[in-house]
Amino acid sequence: MSAGLYSTRAMLSTVMIESIGPGGQLLITDEIENYPGFQTGVKGQALADEMFSQADRFGAKMEYAEVEAVENLHDDRKLIRTSEGDFTARALIIATGGSHNKLGATGEDEFSGRGVSYCAVCDGNFFRGQDVVVVGGGDAAMDESFYLTGICNSVTVIHRRDELRATKVLQDRAFANPKYKWLWSHVVEEFVGNDVLEAARVKNLKTGEVYDYPTAAAFIYVGFHPNTEYFKEVLDMDELGHVYADIHMRTNVPRVYACGDARAESTRQLGAAVGDGITAALAAFHDLSS
Ligand SMILES: Cc1cc2nc3c(=O)[nH]c(=O)nc-3n(C[C@H](O)[C@H](O)[C@H](O)COP(=O)(O)OP(=O)(O)OC[C@H]3O[C@@H](n4cnc5c(N)ncnc54)[C@H](O)[C@@H]3O)c2cc1C
């Protein structure tokens, strides 16, 4: 949306193609405390709405469609095939972000939506006052588990290591909160229950013991992968699929740019993604004008 805002203000005819709704990962983030300009933090959804309205006010069009393929990227007019039809553009900014990784435990798909979730902000309320688990030890796990502590009776973090990967400030906040319980050096092997999830079958990696840990819900945060599959053959990427771009967000293909979480070496922070989008739009403006 920052790319859309800047390119439309630069008088480029701009379409933002979005498959779910404006906001991306903001829509599954409760509180953002580190986005500059908000002394007391801001709700993800509220910030997404503001960003969308601002881009919309300047004329950036939002098309609700799933990009399914891209063709002719080296041509003057690039072809973007979507669920709602084809688009052509002289410049293409890739801001497709990333998606949650699955854990790969038995029963994960079976209990998805019936206790297994990837979004505490979306589903946490269903488990108000109950005991839940969070799987993972990074920033997303700590951010979302903290949200759950405001709703649930207890939140047990299941982590395969014996220390967290999350930033220090998030760790400190969690360790100070009595609602947390910790299963260090544990992995989830299976989700078990009848109609709904009843327990996570966990394994203690130090002792080898396998046992059922009762829980009403399991929220999984074990990383992301970039949404860049359809660029694989054409764009230079790292081994996980993040697109390489220079400091102007230019990729190896002229007038194709990559920004935000989809870009290699991204800090995967909102402020950085916003800045990347601005840089990409200004580079596109420069390239189209020269
Ligand atoms: C739980 C959580 C908490 C976070 N907390 C913070 C925080 O406190 N501070 C911070 O700075 N950052 C935080 N982040 C990270 C921040 O949200 C991301 O860095 C940022 O949203 C990345 O923006 P983006 O535009 O690159 O990608 P995304 O936000 O992932 O947006 C990508 C968009 O592209 C769309 N899309 C993808 N593929 C297609 C397709 N084929 N067709 C059409 N549309 C498509 C998606 O629907 C999505 O809307 C958090 C993230 C999560 C998950």
Image (spheres, grey):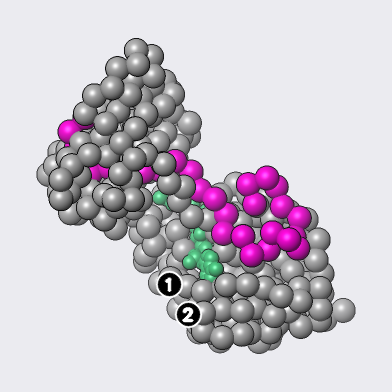
- On whether ligand 1 comes within 8 Å of the CB at mark 1, the answer is yes
- The foreground one among 280 and 15 is 15
**Highlighted range, magenta:** 213-241
Is label 2 in contact with label 1 (beta carbons under 8 Å)? yes
Tell me if residue 191 comes above or below residue 47 in the rendering: above
Which disc number belongs to residue 64?
A: 2
In front of the other: 46 or 81: 81
Q: Amino acid at mark 2?
A: Tyr
Q: Relative to 100, does residue 52 appear above or below in the rendering?
A: below
Which residue corresponds to mark 1?
21
Q: Residue at x 76, y 55 (%)?
A: 236
Is 233 part of what is drawn in magenta? yes
**Magenta-drawn stretch contains 65:** no
Q: Residue at x 28, y 22 (%)?
A: 210
Image mark for residue 179: none
Q: Position of residue 75 (x, y in %)?
A: 81, 78
Q: Quadrant of residue 6?
A: bottom right
Q: Residues within 10 Å of mark 1 (few under 14, many from 20)?
A: some
The residue under the point 37% across, 29% down is 187
The spot of residue 258 in percent (x, y) is 68, 62
Where residue 110 appears, as percent x and y from the top left, is 29, 50
Residue 16, quarter of the rendered image: bottom right
Is 216 on the left or on the right of 33, as rendered?
Answer: left
The quadrant of the picture occupied by the C terminus is bottom right
- Residue occupying the point 21% across, 30% down: 213
Give the side of residue 102 with respect to residue 257, left or right.
left
As helix, strand or loop, the secondary structure at mark 1 comes to loop
